Amino acid sequence: MIRICSTEDLPKGTVVSADVDGTPVALVHAEDDAFYAVYDECSHAAVALSEGEVEGCTLECWLHGSRFDLRTGQPTGLPATEPVPVYPVEVRDGDIYVSLTPSNGVTR
């Protein structure tokens, strides 16, 4: 697990982009008050998901509007049809840690 930031650095409904050992990761504080980490690139168009909007437990790509479920990585809105990797997140002592082993089996 690699420390990304403090929970205080990521208010609810926001996203931060992080480079974790060369892997772009979008770290999200979703509206369900949980923290999620997904690969920071839309599977439809190679743009940063971290620049998109959080809605519930989904992250919307700003370019074409594809939506991804933060828990599964599955697209919930077209035009994306391929899932994005989802990474395990752990909160310890107010800090957010991410593992680069995808929890949904999807790799890039």
Image (spheres, rainbow, N blue to C red):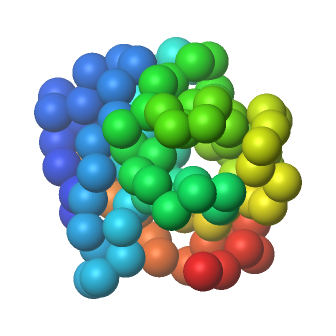
Residue 70, picture quadrant: top right
The residue that appears at 26% across and 59% down in the rendered structure is 18
Q: Residue 106 location, x and y as percent?
A: 72, 74
Question: Quick check: can you spot residue 60?
Answer: yes
Q: Quadrant of the N terminus?
A: bottom left
Residue 4, picture quadrant: bottom left
Left or right placement of residue 68 versus residue 7 in this view: right
Front-most of residues 74 and 43: 43
Question: Vertical placement of 62 versus 2: above or below?
Answer: above
Q: How many numbered marks does the figure carry?
A: 0
Question: Quick check: can you spot residue 91?
Answer: no
Q: Residue 21 location, x and y as percent?
A: 27, 83
Left or right placement of residue 73 versus residue 28 in this view: right
Left or right placement of residue 56 versus residue 35 in this view: right
Q: Residue 43 location, x and y as percent?
A: 65, 61
Q: Residue 7 location, x and y as percent?
A: 24, 35
Question: Vertical placement of 107 versus 15: above or below?
Answer: below
Q: Quadrant of the C terminus?
A: bottom right
The residue that appears at 67% across and 57% down in the rendered structure is 44
The residue that appears at 36% across and 18% down in the rendered structure is 12
Front-most of residues 74 and 32: 74
The residue that appears at 47% across and 25% down in the rendered structure is 53
Question: Vertical placement of 106 versus 84: above or below?
Answer: below
